[in-house]
Amino acid sequence: AAGVIQSPRHLIKEKRETATLKCYPIPRHDTVYWYQQGPGQDPQFLISFYEKMQSDKGSIPDRFSAQQFSDYHSELNMSSLELGDSALYFCASSLGVSGEQYFGPGTRLTVT
Amino acid sequence: KNEVEQSPQNLTAQEGEFITINCSYSVGISALHWLQQHPGGGIVSLFMLSSGKKKHGRLIATINIQEKHSSLHITASHPRDSAVYICAGYNTDKLIFGTGTRLQVFP
């Protein structure tokens, strides 16, 4: 069965650069969530989208923005990267906002 | 106070032992996810439950809504069960993660 796809899987950027992470949900899933997991930390909710509209917002820095496109894939744009942005970024998708969330493999971002 | 709390934080077991991981949650959590995260980082959804009990292979998850408590049981544990197990609660449409339980099963 198709799973959540994230790209790239690994990304290395320098401070002050920008990065774009992509998430392709499971087919027919209309809801996408972004989570950030710092080294040795619990995943933290960043933002979610339902039917291409922002559904909820968590601890997402103002330097980050995200959107969900007409094909339901989502992109997380990160600007003015800081060393503290180094983390594993997970995307999850569900059918509806109350549906079971299925996680992608994550994108490991390293900021040097 | 975290909305989702897990215990224990670390757990070691011998192969074949029965394992229990506990999760307590606060008001506002409507359902619980049990997740497994391996050293490579990928997260796998094990169960989502809002009432009763679910079983999949050697894994059993239960939830008591009145007590706001859930447990994940692993029967006949195996070294390949070694991972971090995370309890995450649904608060409206986002997951609130517990601190995870690091399980190591030795042969």
Image: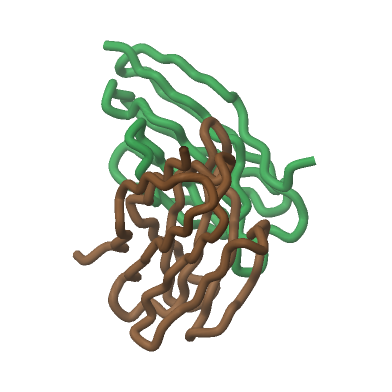
Chain colours: A brown, B green
Looking at the rendering, in which quadrant would you find the C terminus of chain B?
top left
In this view, the residue farthest toward the right is B1
B99 to B107, vertically: above or below: below
Residue at figure coordinates x 42%, y 73% from the top left: A74
Residue B6 rendering spot, x and y as whole percentages: 62, 34
Residue B83 rendering spot, x and y as whole percentages: 39, 30
- Nearest the eye: B74 or A33: A33
Residue A11 rendering spot, x and y as whole percentages: 35, 48
- Nearest the eye: B59 or A14: A14
Image quadrant where residue A21 sits: bottom left
- Nearest the eye: A22 or A41: A22
Horizontal arrangement in the rendering, residue A14 relative to residue A63 (left or right):
left
B19 to A107, vertically: above or below: above
In this view, the residue farthest toward the bottom is A70
A79 to B77, vertically: above or below: below
- Nearest the eye: A59 or B104: A59
Image quadrant where residue A26 sits: bottom left
A27 to B30, vertically: above or below: below
Residue at figure coordinates x 54%, y 60% from the top left: A79
Residue B96 rendering spot, x and y as whole percentages: 63, 52
How many callouts does the rendering have? 0
Looking at the rendering, in which quadrant would you find the N terminus of chain B?
top right
Residue at figure coordinates x 32%, y 12% from the top left: B106
